[in-house]
Amino acid sequence: MITVTLPTKIYNIEIKSGLHQEIGGLVKSVWKPKKVVLITDQQVAKHYLNDTVSQLETAGFEVLTEVVPVGEQSKSLATVSKIISEMATEGFTRKDGVVALGGGVVGDLSGLVSSLYMRGIPFIQIATSLTAMVDSSVGGKTAVNLGEVKNIIGTFHQPDLVIIDPDFLRTLSQRNLVEGYGEVVKCSALEGGEFFELTGRITDPVGILTNATELIQRSIGFKADVVMKDEKEQNLRRILNFGHTFGHAIELLGHGELKHGEAVSIGMVRISQCFENIGVTQKGITSEITDRLLAVGLPIDSDLIGTDEFLEHLKNDKKNDGKQLNLVALSEIGLPIIVPKSLESIPEFLNS
């Protein structure tokens, strides 16, 4: 268990194999029985919806289910509006709650719904994908997309509890498992030390499953420490965007062809190589990161980077401060730094 302590909130992240059989009791340990809306997607619903609803109802909760399509298209204001309308119809009050059962898309969507309904109601995350387990379920960021602008509408809204069971990973396709590993490599490169050594020993997707609990604990431990020091991303928390500035742009330009972790993988490699070329990043670091990504089959390059559409997307990036991007570089493994770059300098930077 990892405890996140913030100025206005303290909550636990429970990490253990078999927790999917204890959901009812875990939720009841932090909430009194009440109405909850359980939000999930069509793929996760096939495996876990009925059992989760049964556990919650046995624990005394009245459950409204909302099953959304798989993918980024569900992160929309239209989906938020639909769910909130149905909650209102069912008489949800400020004392009721939202439970997310799914990956990053479901978590981001559910968190935003809970932050907006009646100006904010309680929220619990049950992470079922590696991406959610190691990244998006912790930290309180919620968001939906607007058109092709990723995560442009969002809030900071911390959960009351995060439930992470590595057993959920066994029902993921290999691609869905591996894409989440992009975020693991990111955290290991930012932290360095034993964590980076651990990712260096993983040589195939099977290794991700074999080491899942430790990979999750180390990733979440690192992220939780950063979030506790900078909840609202005013300074330190920006380092968690390593690989994301370029990654978010190509993820959206890929129109569903690229998964989030795949895009982050490409973004980390390209930005590291660019910074290595101009002497900001220590020589050889890009190769070390690349080796870890290629070992499990993650992509490391995209023709979308540098296109006019790509550069246009950077203007809408959340790290855009006026006409300046705050890019994350690794001076060396375990030593991230923020490097401001003007938007007009990006084409030259990409070709350095």
Image: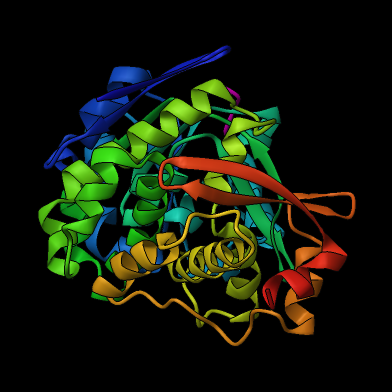
Residue 245: percent from the left, percent from the top?
A: 64, 60
Residue lying furthest top in this view?
7
Rendered location of residue 37, percent (x, y): 47, 42
Q: Which residues are magenta?
A: 90-94
Residue, x 49% and y 77% (percent of image)?
Answer: 258
Image mark count: 0
Q: Position of residue 11 (x, y in %)?
A: 40, 20
Residue 51 visible in the picture: no
Q: Nearer the viewer, residue 201 or 108?
A: 201
Q: Is residue 321 left or right of residue 85?
A: right
Can residue 57 be spotted in the picture?
Answer: yes
The dominant secondary structure in magenta is loop
Viewer-proximal residue, 174 or 295?
Answer: 295
Q: Is residue 295 above or below residue 102?
A: below
Image quadrant where residue 87 sits: top right
Q: Residue at x 23, y 62 (%)?
A: 47
